[in-house]
Amino acid sequence: MLTQTTTRVLEPSDLGAALAILESEPVANAFVTSRVQVAGLDPWRLGGEMWGWYAGGRLRSLCYSGANLVPICATPEAIRAFADRARRAGRRCSSIVGPAEPTAQLWRLLEPGWGPAREVRANQPLMVTEHPSADVEPDPLVRRVRKEETEILLPACVAMFTEEVGISPMAGDGGLLYQARVAELIDSGRSFARIEDGKVVFKAEIGAATTLACQIQGVWVAPGHRGRGLSETGMAAVLRYALADVAPIVSLYVNDYNTPARKAYTRVGFRETGAFMSVLF
């Protein structure tokens, strides 16, 4: 039994062991950890299954299987086991995303059956900071979005998502799930924007938050306002809120080819500490 390896769908009683693994890498696992802390491991509440890989009778690695397929602290042997389970189940996710090395291994095993992907982003630098830079003054007009401003924010969110992912989030179910997510972030005080004359000039969200780390996402500047440094001053403002109100470590990941964004985030105080990978279907 000590050498036996196996995978299974985790149950609510496995929550403590799963959180111990998730919290061992608080920055890389912030997205999944934030969901598990709120929803537990019940698949209906979590929005997907949490697969566990056991070696020697102990839980060693995880894989979240929902709208995204996310390997978590996954060893090469665990990746092979997760790939076998994913192949048997068939593709249900819209993307595979996670730390670059295990995600690349997982995709190599799944690509023959699941490919081709719509797009593979093999190197997305993971950037982290615990302290804002003194070189960039936060934009005083960036603030939390109010509930009554949801309809003002939504078009900017749709534009950002479409630019970033290549498809509209309003497709499929008419955007119901996406609109619910936008409203959820506003209600939780994690949506920020600079709004002028009833239109969004800059926006960003704290998309995942735990007590140990949080992750900024959805950074967007309206096309007519680009090139004016608003991404830097806006991010400095969001970073100030995040460090003061949410978590002691703030992270984000960015496409490697987006040189202006990487430079802007570096000026604000972020440093590159690793890389993520995304496979989009």
Image: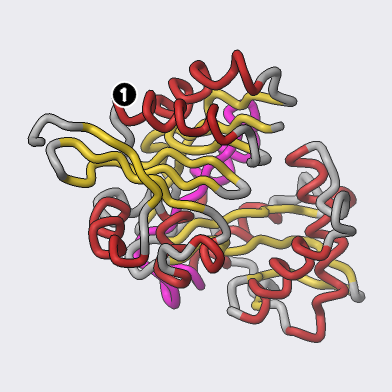
Q: Is residue 51 left or right of residue 218?
A: left
Residue drawn 80% across and 41% down? 163
Furthest residue to the left?
A: 2
Residue 251 in the image: above or below residue 199:
above
Residue drawn 85% across and 47% down? 168
Residue 52 sits in quarter: top left
Residue 249 sits in quarter: bottom left
What is the quadrant of the N terminus in the image?
top left
What's drawn in magenta, residue-wise? 241-267
Q: Which residue is mark 1?
A: 76
Residue 9's spot in the image, x, y percent? 40, 49
Residue 255 in the image: above or below residue 178:
above
Viewer-nearest residue: 147 or 244: 147
Residue 253's spot in the image, x, y percent? 53, 42
Magenta region includes residue 172: no
What is the quadrant of the C terminus in the image?
top right
Residue 37's spot in the image, x, y percent? 40, 69
Residue drawn 42% across and 63% down? 41
Regarding residue 225, the answer to whether it shows in the image is no
Q: Is residue 112 left or right of residue 5?
A: right
**Tag 1: amino acid:** Pro
Residue 38's spot in the image, x, y percent? 45, 72
Q: Is residue 227 left or right of residue 49?
A: right
Element class at badge 1: helix
Regarding residue 180, the answer to whether it shows in the image is yes
Residue 15 sits in quarter: bottom left
Residue drawn 37% across and 51% down? 27
Magenta region includes residue 256: yes
